[in-house]
Image (tube, helix red, strand yellow):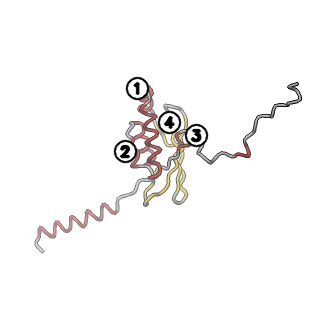
Amino acid sequence: MSYYRRIVFLMCVLGVLFTSCKKRPEPQEVAMEFMHAFQESNFERAKEFATKESQQVILLYSIFDGKRNENEREKIKNAQLKIVDHKEDGDKATVTILNSSANQQETLQLVKENGQWKISLTLESILPTYVAPGSMDMNSMTTPPAADSSKAN
């Protein structure tokens, strides 16, 4: 093998070693990258940090985001984000972020997908008043009292 081929071969081997040893992002890093993408209304980038199941939720959110006025969008873009808590439990994690624009905490759920931490979104996580079909407890619903026919006469 010629000298140059050996050098090229060695560089290839080192490249493979360095890329395979690359540190995978922690849940906190994934959460912050995801939130920064949302701040910039860069939903394609946000999808990179989300599970496959979350893709439709991000698409739906992008539609709502498109209806924001410029002042709202600027407030979101300039918000300060700070991680205030994080927990890991096997292949699940939560990261709580303080959002200065709303002065409230947002807790993101993460799961491992193909060995990487990904944000797991549901419709409920972006629309707190959303009730999933089939999730209503019919036993807890009350019916209005029946009209008393004896009082009608």
Specify the amino acid type for callout 2.
Arg
- Tell me if residue 99 comes above or below residue 90 in the rendering: above
| Residue labelled with disc 2 | 45
Of labels 4 and 1, earlier in sequence is 1
Determine crowd level at label 4: few under 14, some 14-19, many 20+ residues with C-alpha closer than 10 A. Answer: some
Specify the amino acid type for callout 4.
Asn
- Tell me if residue 132 comes above or below residue 76 in the rendering: below
Specify the amino acid type for callout 1.
Glu
Q: Residue at x 58, y 40 (%)?
A: 130
Q: CA distance from mark 2 to mark 1?
A: 21 Å
Left of 106 or right of it: where is 145? Answer: right
| Residue labelled with disc 4 | 99
Specify the amino acid type for callout 3.
Tyr
Q: CA distance from mark 1 to mark 3?
A: 26 Å
Tell me residue 136's x, y (percent): 66, 45
- Tell me if residue 29 comes above or below residue 99 in the rendering: below
Determine crowd level at label 1: few under 14, some 14-19, many 20+ residues with C-alpha closer than 10 A. Answer: few
Of labels 4 and 2, earlier in sequence is 2
| Residue labelled with disc 3 | 130
Give the label on residue 70, or none.
1
Q: Residue at x 49, y 31 (%)?
A: 101
| Nearest to the observer: residue 142 or residue 20 | 142
Tell me residue 54's x, y (percent): 47, 48
